Amino acid sequence: MTRLKLSDITDGKPVKLTIEIPARLHRRLIEYGTVLNGGVHEDAPVPEVLIPPMIERFVASDRDFAKARRRTHASSSR
């Protein structure tokens, strides 16, 4: 079984953004959704559903961001 980094797609209160992505990335996201759906294209998560948790996971795993955030919070609480 394929072990993907994205596993939990939860619903939350959305904030609408409009972005443009390259067609190649769009195709890859469609493929990713299909793989995430067990290889079945029907009812697979669409890019609009995949992108938010992917970005959230990226930000959560960015160590440099976490360090900078801690420094910012520490200096603002003084």
Image (cartoon, helix red, strand yellow):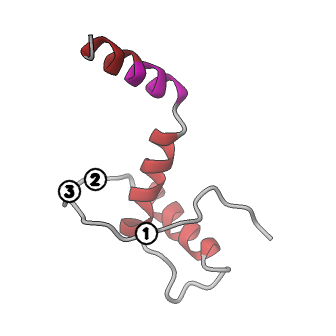
Q: Is residue 3 left or right of residue 66?
A: right
Residue range of the region highlighted in magenta in the rendering: 63-70
- Local crowd at mark 3 within 10 Å, few (<14), some, or many (≥20)? few
Above or below 62: residue 76: above
Q: Quadrant of the N terminus?
A: bottom right
Q: Which mark is residue 62?
A: none
Instruction: Using the numbered discs, state the Cα–Cα distance from disc 2 to disc 3 in whole angstroms.
Output: 7 Å
Report helix, strand or loop for mark 2: loop
Residue 60 position in % (x across, y down): 49, 41
Q: For marks 2 and 3, give the one nearer the viewer.
A: 3
Report helix, strand or loop for mark 3: loop
Instruction: Using the numbered discs, state the Cα–Cα distance from disc 1 to disc 3 in whole angstroms.
Output: 20 Å
Residue 16 position in % (x across, y down): 19, 61
For label 3, the residue is 18
Instruction: Using the numbered discs, state the Cα–Cα distance from disc 2 to disc 1 in whole angstroms.
Output: 23 Å
Judging depth in this view, the residue of 37 and 15 nearest the camera is: 15
**Residue at 35% in and 16% down:** 74
Above or below 8: residue 53: above
Residue type for callout 1: Thr
For label 1, the residue is 10
For label 2, the residue is 20
Marks 3 and 1: in contact by CB < 8 Å? no
- Local crowd at mark 1 within 10 Å, few (<14), some, or many (≥20)? few
Residue type for callout 3: Thr
